[in-house]
Amino acid sequence: MKAEDLKNKLIAVARANPPSDHVPPGFQSRILALISVRPIQDLWAVWAKGLWYAVGPCVAVMLLFSAWAAFGPLHQKPSVDLAQQLNNTLLAAVDQDNNDPTW
């Protein structure tokens, strides 16, 4: 809801109900002043602030994994042919016996 619409609705409700003795003098003026002074929150700024806070940990994790990939034990020549294992896994369903009654 926009601040101007809220202000108009509050003024309309206040005019419909006359002030009683229980309301301190100047109460309406203070409330309207607080509503008009309150800044409108920018949701894009909130998202940007959160993303900037996340930059540091993301860079740290990226550097950690980069160092692990460059200097870790997997950097040596692999003893297992991963391409052959992937090929065997993907073609396992094709290589099954077609006379299998469990279909």
Image: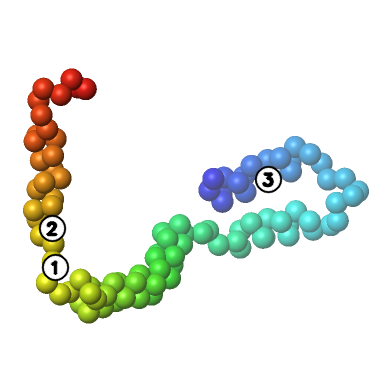
The earlier-in-sequence mark between 3 and 2 is: 3
Name the residue located 15 percent from the left edge and 45 percent from the top edge. Answer: 89
The amino acid at mark 3 is Ile
Residue 38 to residue 72: above or below: above
User: Which disc, if any, is residue 78?
Assistant: 1
Q: Which residue is mark 2?
A: 82
> Residue 78, position in %: x, y?
13, 68
User: Which disc, if any, is residue 94?
Assistant: none
Within-10-Å neighbours for mark 1: few <14, some 14–19, many 20+? few
Which one is in front, 59 or 26?
Answer: 59
**Which residue, as the protein is rendered here, is positioned at the far right?**
21
The amino acid at mark 2 is Leu
The earlier-in-sequence mark between 1 and 3 is: 3
For marks 3 and 2, give the CA distance. 73 Å
Q: Nearer the viewer, mark 1 or mark 3?
A: 1
Q: Which residue is mark 3?
A: 11
Which one is in front, 12 or 77?
Answer: 77
Secondary structure type for disc 1: loop
Where, quadrant-wise, is the C terminus in this rendering? top left
> Residue 5, position in %: x, y?
57, 45
